[in-house]
Image (spheres, grey):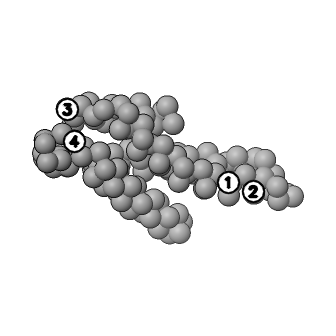
Amino acid sequence: MPIQLGMMARISAIYGIEVDKAAMASIAATAAATQAGRTVAGNLLKLVPGFGTVGGGAINATVAAGFTGAIGAAWSAVCVKLGEGKLRGVNGALDTESIRSLFLDELKNQVSKLKLHAKEK
């Protein structure tokens, strides 16, 4: 997740958004847990005779790359909302739960797009 956290920090900087690193880490950790389930699928394929380690490793790398791109697109959507002054709590502080919720919704949307794109090929 260090690469994804760094990417999220750079995206935030591009939008001129200062986001608490702990909040980003929490959001990214949630996303990582989601990816862990997908990684298991690639690891299970490594056990299939004839497909082996190379095939399972290639699937893991493809999933990781796609997932990293999805994280970036989802975080960009969050930064747009933050730039518009949305996602603030009652006292004006960032509403981390709303940020997390929007991020996960956007991430699901991006992953769905990846699945549709993969089916088209």
**Mark sitting earlier along the chain (2/3):** 3
21 lies left or right of 112: left
Q: Position of residue 44 (x, y in %)?
A: 75, 56
Check contact, mark 3 vs mark 1: CB within 8 A.
no
Give the residue type that dot 3 points to. Gly
Q: Which residue position holds label 4?
A: 94
Q: Position of residue 31 (x, y in %)?
A: 47, 49
**Mark sitting earlier along the chain (4/2):** 2
Q: Position of residue 58 (x, y in %)?
A: 67, 48
**Mark sitting earlier along the chain (4/1):** 1
Q: Residues within 10 Å of mark 3 (few under 14, many from 20)?
A: few
95 lies left or right of 8: left
Q: Which residue position holds label 3?
A: 16
Residue at disc 3, secondary structure: loop
Q: CA distance from mark 4 to mark 3?
A: 15 Å
Q: Residues within 10 Å of mark 2 (few under 14, many from 20)?
A: few
Q: Which residue position holds label 1?
A: 40
Q: Residues within 10 Å of mark 4 (few under 14, many from 20)?
A: some
Compared to residue 106, the image places residue 3 above or below, namely: above
Check contact, mark 4 vs mark 1: CB within 8 A.
no
**Mark sitting earlier along the chain (4/3):** 3
Q: Quadrant of residue 102?
A: bottom left
Closer to us: 99 or 53: 99
Q: Of tags 4 and 3, which is closer to the observer?
A: 4
Residue at disc 2, secondary structure: helix
Check contact, mark 1 vs mark 2: CB within 8 A.
yes
